[in-house]
């Protein structure tokens, strides 16, 4: 099994480094990966053959998430927006957005783990979009701490600021979510169990047009009182956006993870 914490050079020496290619209707992708698991669980779930497919796009284009609102269109995404990619991993989401939607001005891709940043930089360059993405080697936090403990997983995309027993710990630079949001008007958030606290910590949503969130019920702190906590987050979305796209049954069923989105057209 590949070392999910390894650098590009360490993966090369171990013989696990590879370039994975995937052709779609909107771009022919090339990604540098350190393991087959990154292909199976990260690229394959995010880079869809269909222009409207992929796990983060799911709430935007599946009608039963729409709650009576119109589903978004591809034209809604191909706008002169500036995105936050919170939990950028090896750059898959940033690469997809910048290749599929050429009108997007910029992505700020926040990823605290340096070895993932190495892969993300290479993936941006291999797909020709490095000039429109700024990689930020920081965690996003809810306070003003300049550094934070970061808990490393056995899955290269599941490291987290939230404490997890038994994990290796490192200290990484950090930036407050409210300062980060001043730079952008669209958000993708996949921050492994910190989404509840982070969303609640946002003081001003007025400049945010679209947010897409991966919400993790399986972490113990979100599993406890899962219905009421998820309802809190949905109320924040309803209070601050015109449309909320969500599977309303997610909090009461056996979902480990769900995705939701919120949108307002005129800001």
Image: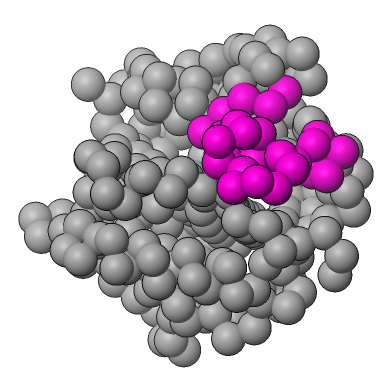
Residue drawn at the location 27% of the way across and 49% of the way down: 252
Residue drawn at the location 28% of the way across and 61% of the way down: 227
> How far across and how far down the image is residue 214, in percent?
45, 49
Q: Is residue 122 visible?
A: no
> How far across and how far down the image is residue 76, in percent?
83, 44
Question: In the image, is residue 48 part of the stretch drawn in magenta?
Answer: no
Q: Which residues are magenta?
A: 51-77
Question: In the image, is residue 69 part of the stretch drawn in magenta?
Answer: yes
User: How is colour applied across the structure in the image?
Assistant: one colour
Given residues 120 and 201, the one toward you in this image is 201
31, above or below 210, in the image: above
Given residues 122 and 84, the one toward you in this image is 84
158, above or below 36, in the image: below
- Kindly indicate the quadrant of the structure image that contains residue 179: bottom right
> How far across and how far down the image is residue 112, in percent?
45, 60
Residue drawn at the location 61% of the way across and 20% of the way down: 48
Quadrant placement of the N terminus: top left
Given residues 148 and 13, the one toward you in this image is 148
Q: How many marks?
A: 0
4, above or below 227, in the image: above
Given residues 148 and 237, the one toward you in this image is 237
């Amino acid at each position: 099994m590949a070392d999910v914490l390894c650098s590009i050079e360490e993966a090369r020496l171990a013989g696990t480094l590879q370039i994975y290619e995937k052709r779609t209707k909107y771009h022919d992708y090339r990604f540098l990966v350190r393991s087959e698991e990154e292909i199976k669980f990260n690229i394959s779930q995010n880079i869809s053959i269909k222009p409207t497919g992929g796990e983060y796009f799911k709430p935007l284009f599946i009608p039963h998430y729409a709650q009576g609102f119109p589903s978004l269109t591809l034209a809604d995404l191909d706008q002169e927006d500036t995105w936050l990619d919170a939990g950028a991993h090896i750059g898959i989401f940033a690469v997809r957005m910048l290749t599929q939607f050429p009108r997007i001005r910029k992505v700020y891709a926040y990823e605290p783990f340096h070895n993932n940043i190495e892969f993300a930089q290479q993936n941006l360059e291999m797909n020709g979009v490095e000039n429109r993405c700024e990689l930020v080697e920081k965690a996003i936090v809810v306070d003003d701490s300049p550094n934070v403990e970061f808990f490393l997983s056995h899955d290269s995309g599941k490291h987290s600021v939230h404490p997890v027993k038994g994990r290796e710990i490192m200290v990484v630079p950090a930036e407050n979510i409210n300062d980060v949001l001043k730079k952008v008007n669209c958000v993708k958030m996949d921050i492994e169990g910190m989404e509840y606290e982070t969303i609640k910590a946002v003081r001003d949503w007025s400049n945010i047009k679209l947010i897409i969130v991966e919400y993790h019920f399986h972490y113990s702190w979100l599993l406890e009182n899962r219905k009421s906590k998820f309802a809190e987050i949905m109320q924040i979305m309803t209070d601050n956006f015109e449309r909320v796209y969500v599977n309303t049954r997610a909090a009461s069923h056996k979902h480990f993870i769900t995705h939701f989105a919120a949108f307002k057209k005129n800001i």
